[in-house]
Amino acid sequence: MKGGLETLSERGFVQQCSDPDALRKLLDSQAVTYYIGFDPTASSLHVGHLVQLFAMAHLQRAGHLPIALIGGGTSRIGDPSGKTEMRKILPIETIRANGERFRGQISRFLDFSQGKGLLLDNADWLAELNYIEFLRDIGRHFSVNRMLSFETYKMRLDSGLSFIEFNYQILQAYDFLVLYQRHGCRLQMGGDDQWGNIVAGMDLVRRVEAGEAFALTTPLVTRSDGQKMGKSEKGALFLDPGLVSPYDFYQYWLNIPDADTGKFLGLFTFLPVDEVRRLGRLQGQEANRAKEVLAMELTSIVHGAEEAEKSREAARALFYGEGADTQRVPSADLDPAELREGIGVLELFVRAGLCASKGEARRLVAQGGAYLDGEAVGDPDHVVGPEKAGQEAFLLRAGKKRYFRFVMR
């Protein structure tokens, strides 16, 4: 089984491609090695990386060979793409530790067994480069004028672009050349903000090796309600369960706008396209069923089927009042002594992360969206006191689906 470009296109993965017809013919005729780089500048991948991970997985399922490249070398200087200021330089030990976590998360999407794919680190060839030789052999192929024509660098000229960041494109291009030379890699993919860097690598392969290589970028995904993709009330939606619980991850997908359901089913599941389209057409209450399918499919991939099922059971129980296990709900300990003195209900909603401020919590109460143990909070000045101190726990709810549990300890 070959091909794959049509699958990527119909599911919404293709933004720009250097030569669609030639790439389609190549993918249809043979197994093609392709790569995407992931700079480990944080301790976990996040939802923004899902487009890249699924794009790679679809091509692998079509019979092609992925290289997931950990940017252990490029992370040491920082990519200016999409950034308004210079990225913080991280200690090498931190980059290495982050890279190990990335490896585990990427392996949930791609199969690296029996030569089906490679998981590499560009520090293996970048960290030991001889600067003079690199400038002479590689740097001579780059035009400063052309580099400055890319939007990435244009955006930074007013605010300031450091020399170390200016080198990033050359290093990423060199990655493509090394992977072409060592592994026959013909295609580099990435987010659309990476177009300039990817094209630079494609050109370098042509200049140094007279080889044919390809560039493909995916769209930068946004939500229809204007909220940044992958941002929740508590911040970025990381794939690490220690940073974002499987339940919170599951809940995020239940709360997306109806208008986004079909798009995200196409991007973030392996369901057949016909099924994606059918689910995406559901309206009203039925749209919630489609969101549950999305949440279940994606949480199963990221956190495992068992965690996904537990999250679904907890969500259904809370939403339908079936009185099931609430242990999966995000929670925190609370000293009963505080309750004996009394805590304002607005303060509790802020502590729970259900509201960003007391002002927001006050508005939630005024709109009838604040609940304490299933009962609406009607008074913003209500004090939660000794009557709850003797309970094992109590439950807060914001709106229809966001819960938090305080446990007496």
Image (cartoon, rainbow, N blue to C red):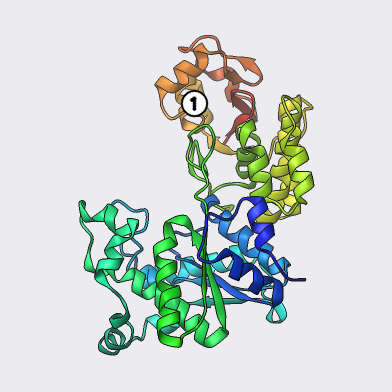
Crowd tier of the residue under label 1, counting other residues whose Cα lies within 10 Å: few below 14, some 14–19, many 20 or above: some
* Picture residue at 70% right of the left edge, 71% below the top: 28
Q: Which of these two is toward me, 269 or 30?
A: 30
| Residue 225 visible somewhere in the drawing | yes
Q: Which residue is mark 1?
A: 348
Q: Determine whether, in the image, residue 93 is placed left or right of residue 240.
A: left
Q: Amino acid at mark 1?
A: Leu
Nearer to the camera, 51 or 375 = 51
225 vs 173: above or below: above
Q: Position of residue 241 (x, y in %)?
A: 59, 52
Which quarter of the picture shows residue 293?
Answer: top right
Q: Is residue 274 left or right of residue 220?
A: right
**Quadrant including the N terminus:** bottom right
Secondary structure of the residue carrying numbered label 1: helix
At horizontal 37% and vertical 75% (from top left) the residue drawn is 171
Vertical comparison of 316 with 206: above or below: above
x, y (%) of residue 252? 60, 39
Residue 376 coordinates in the image, percent (x, y): 61, 14
Residue 204, picture quadrant: bottom left
Q: Quadrant of the C terminus?
A: top right
Q: Quadrant of residue 61?
A: bottom right
Viewer-proximal residue, 27 or 369? Answer: 27
